[in-house]
Amino acid sequence: MVFPDGIPAFEQETRFLALRQPINEPLVFLQSVANPNLCFATLPALSACPGYQLNMAPEDLDALGLGTGRQPSIGRDVLCLAILSFEENAPPTANLQAPIVVNVHTLRGRQAIQTDSPYSYREVLPLREAACS
Amino acid sequence: MLVMRRRAGESILIGEDIEIQIIHIGESRIKIGITAPKSIPVTMKEVKLVAQENLAAAQLRSVAALRNLLDRLSEGPAGGEK
């Protein structure tokens, strides 16, 4: 997948692979092609939040070659991944306000910063209680 | 903070080289044109916030943390209910 502008803080990283392994379902790893040390753990936005809806800015839609008249359909038009953050002593969070969006037809991608979004950069994931050990 | 009142079509100058023009005032947002030297990056503030989030997310994480997350995610790739 090609990210012509990279993503914020990693503007030079323009090519990523989306890696999925059955054992790690539903996680998707975003691995930089140029930098072996750069790999993001992500979740499909719909896995992180069922019913998730995009609200992309016209500039982002345009940059991905998507029509600006409507929001793209997740799955049919675009792949939509939320980058996960793991901080110590805090629950893992997903960036649902600025998801990675990839045009499935052109494999061109971009991190879409949504200013009008009901979601946050650190959306706490709906998790079951940890199993008793 | 300096506060100015401007109408559509009017501009603000910052120093010699930076001009900020109010292009259009809509109901809930305004359109702004910015002229600045190439050496001065102009971005939405949100880009900086997202950059910080991305830097934090790129930090090495333990396999245990990932395993724990997977164990606790609700069943099925499109799950989410308990």
Image (tube, rainbow, N blue to C red):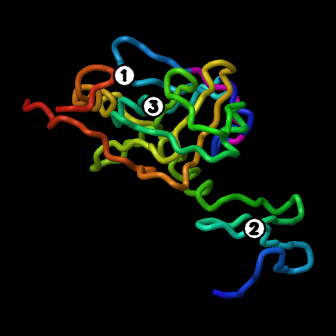
Q: Amino acid at mark 1?
A: Pro
10 Å crowding of disc 2: few (<14), some (14-19), many (20+) = some
* Type of secondary structure dominating the magenta stretch: loop
- Residue A74 percent location from the top left of the image: 50, 28
Q: Which residue is mark 1?
A: A26
Residue at the image point whose x is 78% and y is 75% from the top: B8
Q: Which residue is mark 2?
A: B24
Chain letter of mark 1 equals A
Q: Magenta stretch?
A: A11-17
Which of label 1 and label 2 is nearer to you?
A: 2
Left or right, B38 with respect to B30, comes to right
Mark number, residue A41: 3
Q: Secondary structure at mark 3?
A: strand
Placement of the N terminus of chain A among the 4 image quadrants: top right
Q: Amino acid at mark 2?
A: His
Chain letter of mark 3 equals A
Q: Is residue B30 above or below residue B80?
A: below
